[in-house]
Every structure is written in C-alpha cells, then in structure tokens.
Image: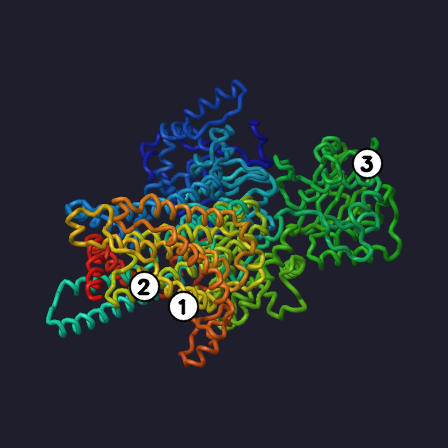
Amino acid sequence: TFPLPQPPHSPPSMPPPSAPDDDPELGSPSSFPISRATLRALFAARDASALAVPYGGPAGLARNYLRSDPVRGISGGEYSHVQKMSDAALDSEVEVKMDAGKMEELMGEDGMGARREAFGTNRFEYPPPKSYFRLLAGAFQDVTLIILCVAAVVSLTIGLAVQEEREHYGYVEGIAIIAVVVVVSNVQAGIDYSKEKKFRQLNSVRDNYTVCVVRSATVLAVPAETIVVGDVIRLMAGDKLPADCLLLTSDVFKTDESAMTGESIEIPKSPDRDPFLISGTTVGEGCGDALVIAVGLDSEWGQILAQLIVEPENTPLQDRLDRLAINIGWFGIVMATLTFVVSMIRWIVDGARSGNWNGNEVLTFFIDAVTIVVVAIPEGLPLAITLGLAFAMRKMMEDMNLVRRLEACETMGSATQLNADKTGTLTQNRMTVVEAYFAGQSYAYMGESLEPGMRNAQQEAAELSQSFKLLVAQSMSVNTKANLHRKDDGSYEHIGSKTECALLQHVQQWGMEYTAIRMQNPSTKIYLFDSTKKRMSTLQAGPRPGVQRLHTKGAPEVVIKLCDSYAAADGSTVMFAPGEQILIQDRIESMAKRGLRTLLLAYRDIDRAGPDVDKDFWEEAPEHHLTLLGIVGIKDPIRPESKEAVLLLRGAGVTVRMVTGDNVLTARFIAEEVGILDPAVDGPNAVIEGPVFRKMSKEDKARVALDIRVLARSTPTDKLMLVRQHKRLGEVVAVTGDGTNDAPALKEADVGFALGLEGTETAKESCDIVILDDNIKSMARAVLWGRNVYQSIRKFLQFQLVVNVVAVSLNFISACAGVPLPLSAVPLLWVNMIMDSMGALALATEPPRMELMERKPFGRYAPLINRAMFRNIIGMSIYQLTVCLVLQFVGEEIFNIPCFPTSSASPEDILEHPCSGTTLELNSVIFNTFVFMQIFSEINSRRIAERDIFSGIFKSYYFCLIIVVTIAVQCIIMFAVAGTTVGDAVGFGTITGAEWGACILLGVLTLPVGFITRLVPLECCFGPLDEDVEQMSRAEQFLHLPRRKAPHFEGIIDEDPDDVPSLADPSAAWKMDDVERVPLVSQTAKMRFRVFVHAVAFVNAVKESSTADKRPVKLLESQKKDK
C-alpha cells in the first residue's frame, strides 16, 4: 500500500534538474554526459573512491550526469504525463500502479524513450523458444533423413513414371520411406517442443514482479522491465534488485549476494563505502533508495545470461554411438566388397567356361553389394534412441526431474563425479535454531545428534515454563527487525536477516505469534548492531510502570561477560555461581566446533524513566548486569533426505563432494554429517580450501582432484577449474547448484542440475536437468534412470545387431551362392525401421531396477558393447542364421512348396515366370520366421548377463503390450496384405498353417538358445569388460589377439588458473568459447564417411525399386533349370 514510508536520514532536497523540455537534444543519446559503457565500467570496478572523486558519489552521478534527482527521481517534462496521473491518483487516495503497456505508452511520449535509446531497456534477451516447425526443420538436418528423403523422391518418381513399375505398385516403397521419415522427424520435434514448453512454463514468472520507483517525488509500483537508467527505486528487506544500482540513502542496509557469489553472509552496504547493489541479488536487511545505472544486458545479471547460449558438446553415449556407427559402416563395406569380389570371380569362371559374358550381371552384383551395406546400417537406431530417451524423460518428470537436454537422461548413468553445492542443495538454505542452552540445560531440535546430557524438544516442552518461554520469545521478537512470510504450503519465507528469521521461526514453533508480541511490546529505542561491540539491543517498556526492559543479543563470547545472572526454567533470576560462566563458555565453544552460528540472548529490567524523558541516560545502552536468557545454535540444516541420497550415490560408485564458500570448520562438519566425508577413510587431501587449490600447479591439481571431498572457501572460479580438471582426467562430471555463480560450472559439466524452487533463472538456463522439488533424492533417482537408459540402449543394440548381423550374413551368403536375396526392400524396411523401433520402445519402457545402483558407473571409457553382449550377439546370430539358411536352400523340400504363379500375375507374367508364387511363399516363410525370431529375441534381450530373462516381466506393462502389438501387426500384415496385389508387389505372400506353426516354433526356440548361450563363460568369449577395457579373455590370449588399449580421452586442454574468468571478478566476462576442445574423432571425417555410406544406400534404393520384383524370380527359375 502506498505511499511507502520514507527511508530514514534522507539527504536535504537538491534543486531539481533543468526541465528536459528545455533541452533540444533530449531525444538524442548524446544529451547525457555519460555513456552506458562508462556506467558499466564504473559498476564493474566496484571502487567507491573512483565514484566519489570525479562524479560526486551516487547523488552527484544522478544529479549531474543522469538528469535525475536523488530524492524526487526523474521529474519535469520528461515525466509530465506520469506526474499528472500520479497527482490525480493521490488526490483520489488510490494506489498508483501501472501495467507495462501503459508505462511503454507514457515512456515513449515524453522523452523516456531517450533514456532507453541511450542506456537500453531492462529486458533480458532470453533466447526465443523455437517454434514446432523450426524444430521440425532442425530434425531434417540429420544426414540419414536427408538421404532417405532423396531416395524416397527418386523411388516415387520411378514408381509413378515407369508404367511397368506403376502396375506393380513400385511407388509403395517410396511412400513407406516418406512415412518413416515423417514419423522420425515429428517425434523428435514433438519431444523437443514439449520439453522446451515445460521449461518456459517453469520460468514464466521469473520477471513478473513490480518495483517501487520514485518519479516526480511520487512512489509508483511499476513492472521491473520498465525501469530505466536514472530511476530512483525504493528498496526494502526481501526486495529483488531489478538492475545494477548505487545506494543513495539508507540507515542499515545489507544485501544477500549468495545468488551471485555463493556466500550466504549478508553484505553491508552504505552510500559512501560500498554503494554497489548487484542485479539479481536481494535486500537482506534495511531499506533505502538506490539509483539505477545499468539495465538489461548491461547489468551483471544480463551479462551472465548473455554468455549462456552455447552449443552443447557430445555426451559420452553420443561419442560411443559415433564410434559404433563407423564400425558398423566399415563392417557393411567389408562384407559388400567381399560379396562383389566373390560374385565377380564366379562370373569370370562361368563366363570362361560357357563363353557367355553377360554385362547386366555385373550390375546385379553391384546392386547386391549395395544391399549388404544398406542392411548393415541400423536405420531404426535414431528413432529407437529418441523413443527410449523420451520415455525416460517423461518418467523422470514424474520423479520431479525436468530434462532440458534429452541426452542428459543417459549421461547421469555414466556420471562418476558429483560436485554438489552446499547451500540449497545439501542444505535447506534456511537458517534454523538446531540447538539451544536454556536454564542450565542443552536442548537439540530437528533430530540433531544428541551429545551426552543433551535433551530433546519434547523434554524442553515439559521442563521450561510458559513464563520462561514468553520471556525468551519477547527477546527474540522485539530485538529483531526481520519478518516471516507464510506461503501457501505452510512454509515460511525469510525476509531480512536470516539469523533473525531463525529466531522468529523458533518463536512460531513454540506456538506464539511474533507479530502479536511486537504489537504488545513496542520498542522505544533501538541500538543497532555494532561490529566493534558485536551486539544489538532494543529498549521497551517494562512489566510495570517506571521500569524499562533492555533486550540484548550478540556474540556469546562477548555478551556472556556482561551477564551476572541467568533465568531459571520457571522464569526467576538466579545469580551465577563461581565458575559457572566458564562452563557456559565451554558450551559455546562446543557449539562452534560443530559448525553452529551461536547467539546469546540476555535482558535487563531498569528502574528508570523512558528515553522520551531521560534522553541523556539512554544515549548509550546500559549493557551490563544482564540476565542470561539462553544461547542458541543456528545453522542451515541439511535436508532430511540428503544423507540417504549421498549414501545411495556413494554406494553406486559416484564420488560425491561438497563445494562451498563456507569456512573449513563448518564445511567439514556438514560434510561429515551428510556422509560425504569419512575421516577414517578419506586421506589428507579430502578437505582443501579454494585458495590453496587455486595456487597449485597443474600436476598437483591432477594429483589431488579426485581425492577432494570438500572444497571450502571456494569461488566460482575454483568450482569451474575443478570440473575442468575432472573432465581432463576422463571423468564424467555432474554438478548441482542453485545460484548464478554456479552457471559456468553447470554449463561446463557433462550434466548440470539446477534447483527449480530456490534456483535462480540463470542457473536454470545453464543446466541440463531442473530438480523441480529441490530434493537431492530426485537427483539420485535421475542417476538410477540414467543407468536404466544406458542399459536399455545396450539391450536394444544387442537386439538390433543380431538383426543386422543375420540379415547381412544371409544376403551375403545368398549373393555369393547366386540365389535370390530372401529379404527384399519393403520387408527389410519393416524389420529395420518399424519393428526395431517398437523393440526399442519395449526395452526402453522397462522400469529401473535398484540393482543398477549397486554397480559402478559406466564412466567415459566403458565400451558400448561389452563381452557379455558379444557373447549373446554371436550365439543368437548363429542360431538365426542357421535357421534362415536352411529355409533358404531346402525350404521348398521341407514344406513341399509346388511351382505356381502369383495370384496377381498377368498371363504374360505367368508364361515368363511360372513359379513366381513359389519364390514369394518361400520368402514369406523366411520373413515371418525372421520376424518371430526377433520378437522372442526381444525377450532374450531383457537381460544381458543375467540368466533369468523373465524376472519382473509382468511388471513391465509397456513391454508386454508392445510385444502383443508387434505380433498383432505382423499377423495383420501376413493375413491382410499377403495374397493381395499390393502384397505380391512388395513381397508378402500367403503361407499355410503348417508354415505358420514352424515360424512360431522356430521363434520360440530362441529362448532356450539364449539361455544356453549365457551358460558360456566370459573367459571363453571375446570383447572388452566394463570394469577393465584392456583385460583380455583366455580365448583372446589363446588366439594371440592384439591387446586392447583404453581409449585416450583428449577432452579439455587444461588452462592456467589465471586464464579462467571468474564471476567473482565483475570485470571478467565468462565465455564458454574460452574452453578449447579437441574432438574424440574428426567430425569432418565422420561426416564424409556418413555421406558416403548413405549415398551408397541411396543408389540401392533406386536400383532396388526397379528390380526387386523381377530379378529374384529369374534367378530362381535359372537355378531350377540347372537342377
């Protein structure tokens, strides 16, 4: 409600500046004798003396350079319309508030636009959210999708333009490819759009707050974004700084800069010594006026935000998938080359014998070779990975984790290091009374660990009388200036000094209202806190007429010397016995050693008239002969779930360390309390101060970086250097934080967590995952989901590679043997794109198992395909390939398939290809058997090393549903499409009941085959282990295979610490571009290789669309003639 109370000690009124209407150059930025760059540099220097001498301090800067009055604010013609409106509002005694639209209109009419032109607006240029179509266009930038699109267009053109192809529905393949591309691109764009929309909703209220501004000597409530340079804003405890300001007037003024510096200590400010108020911070105590000198992107807050828009680097999984894609590509090329070479040798030998050299067969050999490459490429992998990560992202949202980067889902599964911020992450960011000494007894609250003789809160309630509690509550309520604001959820927001708020909340816990106590006991004189005396006192009227009561609180080691008595449990006063004060001092030291901030409460009743009568006596507070009320131990308590979460993470092999700005003593105690530090296990380098770490050589940093458990007295620079050092050592690093100072480390880490409730907007913009409930246990759940995602991707790859190995080998052998390829283009498209994607979704929807938290993290070096996966892939591939080859070469005899044409064949086709139906039926049996083997292979793939593949299968509802849907779709294809003209064209024919039974039986047999394969010891198999990549198996040693080498990580080149910009240094600009990166594999080489492989795939799509129907039939007939 306005008008607000004027701040105390306001300076005398200054003559108003000349009216802007008199200045013809007002509309030009040059009308102001100071530039925005100068103001920015002036604030960045933080030098009060440099501000005082040439500019005359904050008041002189306002009056002489910014055309503003320190008391009246911006006034005159420049603000005439607002003046008229505010005058009318005051006449009618209504509150003056304006929305942003009205402010924009007024600012543009009367010269406020000149200030905006000269010094900018107070809007932070957050990156605009990408539209759905822009995200869709981004999805089409994938090389695979581009090649598929080109192939689809060419296939459609040929299928529609050539009459023969059109009659045989040659355009169906092109339509199928386009459908797949549309699905992949829209799924990816839809996922990106939904997560971006969620994040925008989370931060939709970040700038929606009003600010009290003085304009034309009238206090107005305006939106923060309408503030301009030169405005005088009125600040009170709890207000957020909307821009960089200089303090003009104040009595006692402190700011909480923890959002920028990480330090929870409130910083005292004054107009002459330290007037610099940083945007984004909050007023902790006091009230006053401030001059705005930098807004928007020129402010400290804006400059940091401007540096956060960087391209994310590859995650460990992306690096592994890149390497896997290259290896698969080379495998396909090698097999294709062998196919072409073997076919050419056979063609030369046959030609030499018969003398018939048919050049068209060479083109056929080339098409077969290209088909091998296409089959080798897992086309369904991009969609499969996207679907798996998207499902995990949705499930993580239920666990209160908002994933901003989809890849962050799996990165947490590889995390080996977690650098956690103390304030707000491990602790509640809320100072609380956790221990107290009342009436000669010690009491513990909030479940704190009890020392011998210490009592709990229930005993306190029974032992302390109501009169004693009322006396203590009166001291806590009256002798404080802070306030509490009750939220809708029942919790309290602290406004003012956090230490005083802890006292007020303790009063509330006793069932009393501090506001009522203050109203019943109004203060008559306040003696503000003095850093030299280390205490504060407040005077109030005593319990009876002619008596004044003085309440004192302060540093215990100082105030205890002023006490000669203490209050007993019944409220009576008892004189100290000899040596009793020494025992109390021992109790104070014990609290301090446990990291508590101690405060002593005392009072004194004085028979004297009040200060309105006896001013001379009350000039100085009579702080002697005090009565001790009690000593309280205050700290920021750890979250109840923090200890459990830390133990869970440590049990999972994740090293948890605390990075804080607190002193070593406090940091060590909290680290031990939460379970991060174990003195019996951790070495001498477990606790290190930031300045010590900063001054170490590169070699020493590398030596101690992994041993550190607590980095105390650290700056944002130290945290950033520690993250870089861990990444340089090959670790996968996760960082948690809530403040603006955490932004560089959050952005630099492999995955950054920001707190959704207490975190600043900058931290949220910088992170990969937002913890919506600020619960560190949610982060542990993210680790579990990350490992589940990684394991699911492994399961899918095990399943997918069996498909590709069997398909490539089958087509390779068929081509070399001169028989038609059993899997044509459309069936392969169904297997590779649709069925594999459903298989990926089935495996990705498996719920996480807590057993995953009992193993070590995958790390950066763990292979994507380990030894157990190689064993399973080889064993399953041998079985499936054997089945397909048997069906390919003796299937006709086994099922006694006669020679007959297809039902849709024309008379001319029947004369030319009388046995086309036989080929179609046999290929359909092979296709149906192949599909059912993959369906049951999905069940086999539920476990990699474990033998019990059915464990928890009925709890995986999505898995069971997708298996049923896949079988249903396959049956629909075989019953509805097979036997039709379309089915004949794309390669789906009708099969008999006996053939159906054989297909299903051969598919079910994959289950016992998989079990037998898992019985083979890993020592008899090939491939790397997760635990040790270099360890060779006995089989590999017996065959004298070359020893594997661990991949060499060339991540971030270590910098000299002096080269790392710091948020603590306001003149330094933090830029991610300063980080030099060396990619694991040449990106240019990878791109060239991918283009080459997909170009070959494109050639195959064109050729296959024109020859898929005719060539296999002709080859089969020629084979029958030979027989």
Mark 3 or mark 1, earlier in chain? 3
Mark 2 or mark 3: whose residue is earlier in sequence: 3
Q: Position of residue 208 (x, y in %)?
A: 48, 35
Q: Amino acid at mark 1?
A: Glu
Q: Which mark lies nearer to you, 3 or 1?
A: 1
For mark 3, give the secondary structure: loop
Residue 9 is labelled as none
In this rendered view, identify the residue nearer to me: 1062 or 136: 136
Q: Nearer the viewer, residue 13 or 400?
A: 400
Q: Secondary structure at mark 1?
A: loop
> Marks 2 and 1, Cα distance to the nearest angstrom?
54 Å
Which residue is pictured at 37% across the width and 45% down the height? Answer: 972
Q: Position of residue 229 (x, y in %)?
A: 43, 39
Q: Position of residue 635 (x, y in %)?
A: 67, 51
**Looking at the rendered structure, which numbered label has been put on residue 608?**
3
Q: Residues within 10 Å of mark 3 (few under 14, many from 20)?
A: some
Q: Nearer the viewer, residue 603 or 432?
A: 432
Amino acid type shown at disc 2 = Val
What residue would you read off at disc 1? 1050
Q: Which residue is mark 2?
A: 890
In the rendered view, does 379 fall on the left or right side of 679? left
